[in-house]
Amino acid sequence: MFTRRGFTAVELVVALAITSIVVLGMMPLLIGFFTSYSGQTQELKHVTQTQQALLTITNDLQRAADFLRVPDTLDDKHPAPAWPGWYFQGRPGTDQDVNRTLILRMPATTAAYQNPSRQLVYNGNSADCATYAGTPVYYTVIYYTLNGSLYRRSVLNPNEPPCAGQRIYQKTSCLGGCAEKDILILRDVSQFRVDYFTNPTAQDPDHSLYHASGHNTDPIRATDARVILQSEAIINDKEHLVTVNARESLLW
């Protein structure tokens, strides 16, 4: 007949000591694993956020009517003087080759662009409102950098009222003091560059197209725009750099 015997106190102490040694020996490996996993997760998030920011810009480029040197309408809420406030090379005192400003003339619509029932909004001052034909209402979209972050601003022209029965879906935004806020597109932006091309097959940008001269408000006579967006983040004490770019042609 067999009898069951439990562990003695000495055996338990020895077993606990061995287990502790094994666990302590594995701790650096476990810490390294979880640190690496956390870092990879943060890096993936960083890449995804940068790509999503570029997608937002690309969607606007695909719908733009014109590339602008300066906005059609300047609101009184932007953080720079009226002139030279917003213009394609960025704001005064910034590194204009690194951080530029993308200014787009966009057609206003009655609903979001993704809504298949949307319609163009026509200018009540000059369009044929009976047939909804003639001159559309346009608004301005401005992408700009401020304190290392990229923002999107939209500005409506108060002198372009819609035809009776139409409502403009888009709203004017600003950093503060108005109902709609500028949209924060991406943090930790180290470069936001915009280049323009004379035709869809051109390989090199034509810088002569858009050098500012005085108060030149003419659109930039380009067919294509290329955006280079770079974000630099510190992840696990290491620099993580993400660079994305896209080139789009005017469709209007």
Image (cartoon, rainbow, N blue to C red):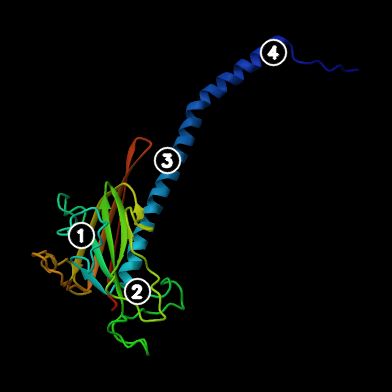
To which residue does mark 2 refer? 108
Q: In which quarter of the image is the N terminus?
A: top right
Q: Quadrant of residue 81?
A: bottom left
Give neighbour class at mark 4: few <14, some 14-19, many 20+ (Cα, 10 Å).
Answer: few
Q: In which quarter of the image is the C terminus?
A: bottom left
To which residue does mark 1 refer? 86
Q: Is residue 242 above or below residue 18?
A: below
Give neighbour class at mark 3: few <14, some 14-19, many 20+ (Cα, 10 Å).
Answer: some
Q: Which of marks 1 and 2 is nearer the N terminus?
A: 1
To which residue does mark 3 refer? 39
Q: In which quarter of the image is residue 103?
A: bottom left
Query: Residue 20, percent across and down?
Result: 58, 19
Q: Earlier in the sequence, mark 1 or mark 3?
A: 3
Per the rendering, the mark at residue 11 is: 4
Query: Residue 144, percent across and down?
Result: 26, 56
Secondary structure at numbered mark 3: helix
Q: In which quarter of the image is residue 182?
A: bottom left
Check disc 2 and give the amino acid type. Ala
Check disc 3 and give the amino acid type. Gly
Secondary structure at numbered mark 1: loop
Q: In this view, does 81 lie above or below 212?
A: above
Q: Do the residues labelled 1 and 3 touch (CB within 8 Å)?
A: no
Q: Is residue 145 above or below residue 163?
A: above
Question: Could you tell me how far apart the alpha carbons at marks 1 and 2 are, in whole angstroms?
Answer: 21 Å
